[in-house]
Amino acid sequence: MALSVVSYRAPLRLALVSLGLSASSMALAAPQAPAPATDAPAADIGTSGDAIIVTGTRESGRLARQSATPIDVVKADTLTATGQSNLVDSLRSVLPSFNAPAVGYDVGALARTFALRGLSPSQTLILVNGKRRHLSSSIYADSDPSQGSNVVDLDMIPLAAVGRVEVLRDGAAAQYGSDAIAGVINVILKDDANSGGVSVQGGKYYAGDGTSIQANADKGVALKDGGVLHLSAGYRYQDFTNRSGDSGGVQPAKVQGMPRSVVVSGGYDYTRPLGETLDFYSFGTYAWRKARANENPRQPGWFSDAVDALYPQGFTPQETLNEHDFSVTGGIKSHGDWAVDLSSTYGRDTVKLRNISTINPDLLADTGNAQTDFNVGGFAASEWTSNLDVKHQFDLGLAGPATFAFGAENRYETYEIRAGEPTSYYSGGPQAFPGFRPSDAANVHRNSVAGYADLTLRPVKAWELSGALRWEHYNGVGSRLNGKLASRYDVTDRFALRGSVSTGFHAPTLAQQNYSATTVTTGYASIQLPLGSPGANLLGAPALKPETSTSASLGFVAEPVHGLSITVDAYRIDVKNRIIESAYLYGDLAQAAIAANGTTIPAGLDPGNVSAVFFTNGVDTRTQGVDMTASWMMPAGALGRIRWDAGLAYVDTTIRRVHAAPAVLANAGLSLVDAVQRTNLTTATPSWKASLAAAWSSGPLDLTLRNTFYSNARQAQGYAEPYYIIDTGARVITDLDIGYRVTPQVRVGVGANNLFDVHPRMIPTAIGQALNYDRYSHVAPYGINGGSYYLRLTVNL
């Protein structure tokens, strides 16, 4: 298929925003026997079903293998053993249902999106120590599987601070609130007084670029007042990569690849007893990120003689980002028959953007101003969440005590879009990224309240039954009551059935409701319309409704022979009112919408070169699939021990209903959903992922080898009919990590991610030049950069 598009990106689009089961410590929710004692390897490859969990249950002391719903526990050693430099890619390497495609250009490649079970990133709730994490101020506004997502930026949580990650693969909005449609990711920070360590890692891609350096340190201390303080710090540097195709001109293309970035972060976890049954606690994280990203090239002769005099060889604009992100929580927790937890959490994320090494041709022509560095604006978002949680166990005369929990939550949210300096939006603005106009600026807020109740019973010894109800109200959105029932029955000591049914919802975020960006030049114009604006109202764009879901899952856990653990869980998730970005709407209506929002359109501009988009509840979908995991600890006698982990994830999403376009658009023959949106929802995520991993250790030596298969992912790309159809092709990715303990405290490791330098299927040059000079599909779940290697030194303190 073909599409005629401009050979450089329309500046409107602001994109900010492996299944391999680690043999180290992937927690499989199935029975497991203790591993035989042996020399400790670099990562804990012992039993993981015996990890105590705090996610998905209100009971204390619950083991992962006893859970009524599927839950994975990934320990800190596992994350380190992946050799990845950030939390998102580490989790992608080890979790069955966790996807993190290599989408995004420019600084949009920084705020990584991710998803569970093939659903939207906005449909997974992120907690830190059980408390809701604030959203990033950036929103993913490009047409990709993550379209319209406004999510938590996991990479702003210091990797050195993470003790383990618990991933609940089940609908849990009735337990935790909005967003928990696909599941919950709960990041547990290190909190003990006896551990600590320092690690340094450096690496590079096989292509010779993308140098990375990271250093992490953490240490716990026991304080004289009986408290415990655990401190963490991290530094991460990532240099440019470039996988762009041929630009066809003097100035080469550099846009498809990783930006250059530096992240400095820190975290703490503090607990102090206030008496025999009362504790004060506090924890927090901070991260600062500075980044620079290449844009599409501008060739000599594209603009005026004055521009060519300034840039004789053409130029490549760059976006820069300066971001600060922090969160702090404080609370008081009691113990005993009635456990009470009163807490408050405040988090904030701010982003400042600049466009450098560029020019505003209209500004230069009209005023002679040859400015090359522009403040184009920025974002800010904050959340202040306060919680009261109460839990009590009592005897009903059943096989075990009943656990009853109830609580309340209040959350206050803010969101800002900050306009750039006037020269950044003069006429068409600087090349690559014009500034946000005053008409795009926003400063909004809202409040939400919630209450819940949760009951777990054990009618007979082998049967557990739990239920939850949660009511939630969002100002400007409305109220929602959600429920959940979950059950587990231990047929034998080695085989158990489990299942759940639940309802859920995702309240549209302030960014989804208010994001706006406008570009107007003498040759084209485009706008992302904020809902409720005059332009959006002119097109009949309705206010966003909450996404609502109905979920069901059924599965089993088994230990057919000693040491072999197997889990299988099938699920179906129906989502109504999914929030997507509309198709590009071209013509007189788009031109009128831009004018209605207060921006003048140049006289004589062809309406066919004027477009408008907005976020909308465009479709209803059904996602169904199966997750399977298996783990076996195999004694190898004098050769040490080997742990085998296998995983398989199948997911299929279909569109059950396409919502009708507003009458004004339908009458003009325009639709809200096109082939791009359809493939983003249904085929841009691989249907199949399978992995086989082995971890061997003997004495001071350890080795982890992981192979992950990804089936083909397909995406339609372009701005109008007909579209290009881009395939990634089916691929197998191999990761290897080898370590040697020089002493019990010092380990030297070397490894490779994507050992055999596998890439997605290459896009033909002629097509790539029409698609931002892409060489590879940017929905490839294993990335586009190819193989990389690293060397790591770890010292335990």
Image: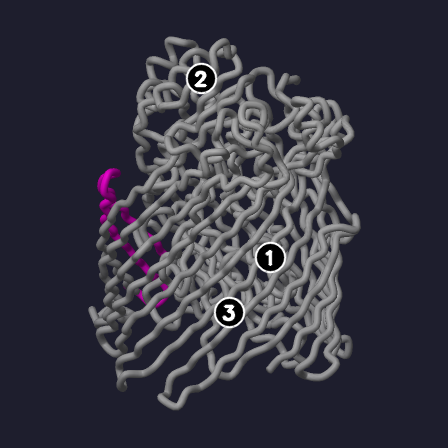
Determine whether 273 is above or below 461 in the image: below
Image quadrant containing the N terminus: top right
Q: Quadrant of residue 388?
A: bottom left
Residue pointed to by mark 2:
601
Dominant SS type (magenta) = strand
To which residue does mark 3 refer?
A: 163
Question: Residue at coordinates 32% horizontally, 32% vertically from top-left?
Answer: 544
Which label's residue is closer to the chain start, 2 or 3? 3
Q: What amino acid is labelled 2 in the image?
A: Ile
Q: Residues within 10 Å of mark 1 (few under 14, many from 20)?
A: many
Task: Locate residue 613, reporting x and y percent.
Answer: 44, 25
Q: Residue at x 62, y 75 (%)?
A: 198
On whether residue 484 falls in the magenta region, the answer is yes
In-front residue for pair 769/479 = 769
- Which label is found at residue 86? none
Q: In terms of secondary structure, where does tag 1 sit?
A: strand
Residue type (three-letter) at the residue carrying disc 3: Gly
Instruction: Give the residues drawn in magenta, as a range.
Output: 459-487
- Does residue 665 appear in the picture of this structure? yes
Q: Earlier in the sequence, mark 2 or mark 1?
A: 1
Report whether 297 appears left or right of 685.
right
Q: Residues within 10 Å of mark 3 (few under 14, many from 20)?
A: some
